[in-house]
Image: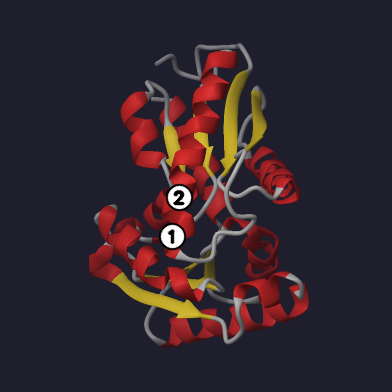
Amino acid sequence: MQSMDTDSRTLTVVLVNPNTNSATTEMMTQLAQHSAGRSGITVEAATVDYGPSMIIEPDALAQSADAVIQCIAQRVDAGPLDAVIVSAIGDPGRDELEASLDIPVVGIGQAAILEASAGGRPFAMATTTHELADSLRGLVHHYGCGENFTGVFLTRSAPLELASNPDAQEIELREAVEAAVAAGAQAVIIAGGPLSETARRLRQTTSAVIVEPIPAAMARVEELLNR
C-alpha cells in the first residue's frame, strides 16, 4: 500500500451507511470530510440499497451486513478506492470486507473503541439503542478491549422518539455520559453514527472525554493509509 506521504494523487475514502437514510449518509460524510487531517482525501458517500432506515435492534444489524458488502462490491466494480468506513456503530460487514479487500476497512465502532481504550483507559458507551446493548458489549470484546470497559449506558427514551427530538436526545445522552463517568469511565463513546451531531455538542458542553466515532474512524483510516 502506498503511503500518503509519497502519493500526491487524491485518495478516495468511501463511507458506507448501513441504513437506508440518505440524509444520515450525507451528514456523516460531511463530518468525515471535515475530520480529514490533510488535503487530498475525498470522502465519497454510499448508502445501502435495502434494509432499515435506522438500525435499532440485533436482527437489523445482522441483516445490514449483507447490504454493506453488496454496496461496496458494486463500488469496487465501478472504480478504484483507497479505504472504506463502515458507518454504523456495530460495524456490520466490516470483518468480511477486510478479509476480501486489500485496502483499509474501518468500522466506526472499531475506531471509537480503540481510541477510547488507548493506554488502558477505562471507557464506556452511551447510546439510545437499548436493544443493541448486548451487541455493543460483544463488539468491545471482539476488538480485545473488554478489560477496561465499564459498560453501556442508555437513555431513558427510545431511539426513534429521540431521533425526532434533538434537544431531548442531547439531554438524555448527557445523563448517560454522567452515569458512565460516575461508574468510573474516563472516556465515553457516543455510540451511533446518526448521533454524530449530538456527540459534537456534548463534546463542547461536558467535561467528560467524548469519543466521536466518525472522526475516530477518519483518523484511523489516515493512520492506516500512512503505513
Of the residues shown, which amino acid type is indicated by label 1?
Answer: Asp
Q: In the figure, is residue 148 to the left or right of 105?
A: left
Q: Residue at left 61%, top 59%?
A: 54
Residue 178 vertical position relative to residue 159 in the rendered view, above or below? below
Quadrant of residue 80 within the rendered picture: top right
Q: Which residue is mark 2?
A: 63
Q: Secondary structure at mark 2?
A: helix
Residue 131 is situated, as x and y percent measured from the top left of the image, at: 46, 73
Q: Which mark is residue 117?
A: none
Of the residues shown, which amino acid type is indicated by label 2?
Answer: Gln
Residue 200 is situated, as x and y percent measured from the top left of the image, at: 67, 62
> In the image shown, does 113 or 50 lie closer to the viewer?
50
Q: Which residue is mark 1?
A: 59
What is the quadrant of the C terminus in the image? top left
Q: Are marks 1 and 2 in contact (CB under 8 Å)?
A: yes
> In the image shown, does 115 or 103 lie closer to the viewer?
103
Q: Residue at left 63%, top 67%?
A: 203
Residue 71 is situated, as x and y percent measured from the top left of the image, at: 55, 32
Q: Residue at left 68%, top 67%?
A: 198
Residue 135 vertical position relative to residue 41 in the rendered view, above or below? below
Residue 193 is situated, as x and y percent measured from the top left of the image, at: 59, 55
